[in-house]
Image (tube, coloured by chain):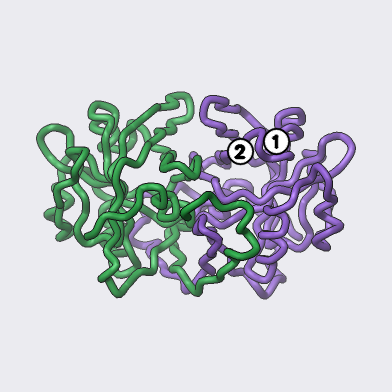
Chain colours: A purple, B green
Amino acid sequence: MKGMQIGRAFTLIEPGPVVLVTTHDGQKNNIMTITWTMVMDFAPRFAITTGPWNYSYAALKKTRECVIAIPTVDLIDKVVGVGTCSGADTDKFGKFGLTPAKAKHVRAPLIEECLANIECRVIDIVAKHNIVVLEGVAAYFDSSRKEKRTVHAVGDGTFVVDGRKLDRREMMKSKLPDGV
Amino acid sequence: MKGMQIGRAFTLIEPGPVVLVTTHDGQKNNIMTITWTMVMDFAPRFAITTGPWNYSYAALKKTRECVIAIPTVDLIDKVVGVGTCSGADTDKFGKFGLTPAKAKHVRAPLIEECLANIECRVIDIVAKHNIVVLEGVAAYFDSSRKEKRTVHAVGDGTFVVDGRKLDRREMMKSKLPDGV
């Protein structure tokens, strides 16, 4: 998986795909499925909504680090599986045949099978609203992967797969930051 | 446009479509295009990231009300158009041929041409992060509309249209709130 420009990492989150978030609590790796995400700036700054109802939250809060991994449609049953069991009693990397890979800046692992990974640091927790504010510090994209379609959770147990692409770069020129 | 159960309104936002947000500043209607959104709960609670760089922000802050309208792919050029001009000098409903419709609980208008609309109240502004926390109070869905595919902004001037649907309701049963 090759490095990608960190300034473009927001383009991985902005379309709203379901993501996997990995943590390392000092002893073991864990993964959670998160669909409540938001870009907050053209800078690599993202929000996720999570809290004590997710087992990973304790590690996220303690280590203030995580990796956001972007799965594609071929991984949908692993994504749903990860989201419906708990790291309290399950080694999710083992159970779902996912491969942890060493990150550069954080102890939380990248997920080898995913299309992209973003190493993140927690820069704030808005406890009142269960919002965790993250800053991306490094990003990776597997351009050799054939399947690049991500998946959007509807929230009722159904998902929408990416369809065709539309290009409105010319119309939006005035609004895009340099280099994007 | 018929009413829909407010408890299901989060399913309109969770997949991450680009949305239109309307406001009424006491004198006139306005619309902004927002792609930075997040569901925060199964309750109808959403976050959007916006700030003084959007002309609508002043009205949103003052009235603490808005409508989130969900456009579909046939409206993409209106959506991009709305996002690349300012309500400071433009009547966006007039310019883009969009029809404001009366809401029940807020003065901000619904958008007749959209697939769905959610009337919202501002329940908090996390000023430090430019996050506006909204609560949905009523929702509407136009099921008579043939085009139901929404559009996801990538953030670089390209957009991804909804593709096919996957059903994982059975696998996710344990995680879904009643009635969803």
Q: Which residue is mark 2?
A: A50
Asked which quadrant contains residue A12, the reply is bottom right
Q: Amino acid at mark 1?
A: Tyr
Residue B53: x percent and y percent? 33, 35
Residue B71 appears left or right of A38: left
Residue A20: x percent and y percent? 68, 52
Query: Would you say residue A139 is visible in this rendering?
Result: no
Q: Chain of mark 1?
A: A
Residue A134 appears left or right of B128: right
Residue B11 appears left or right of A141: left
Of B135 and A143, which appears nearest the observer? B135
Residue at 63% over, 47% down: A6
Query: Would you say residue B48 is visible in this rendering?
Result: yes
Residue A51: x percent and y percent? 63, 34
What mark, if any, has residue A57 been given in the picture?
Answer: 1
Q: Is residue A103 above or below residue A73?
A: above
What mark, if any, has residue B90 been given in the picture?
Answer: none
Of B138 and B48, which appears nearest the observer? B138
Of A80 and A102, which appears nearest the observer? A80
N-terminal of the two: label 2 or label 1?
2
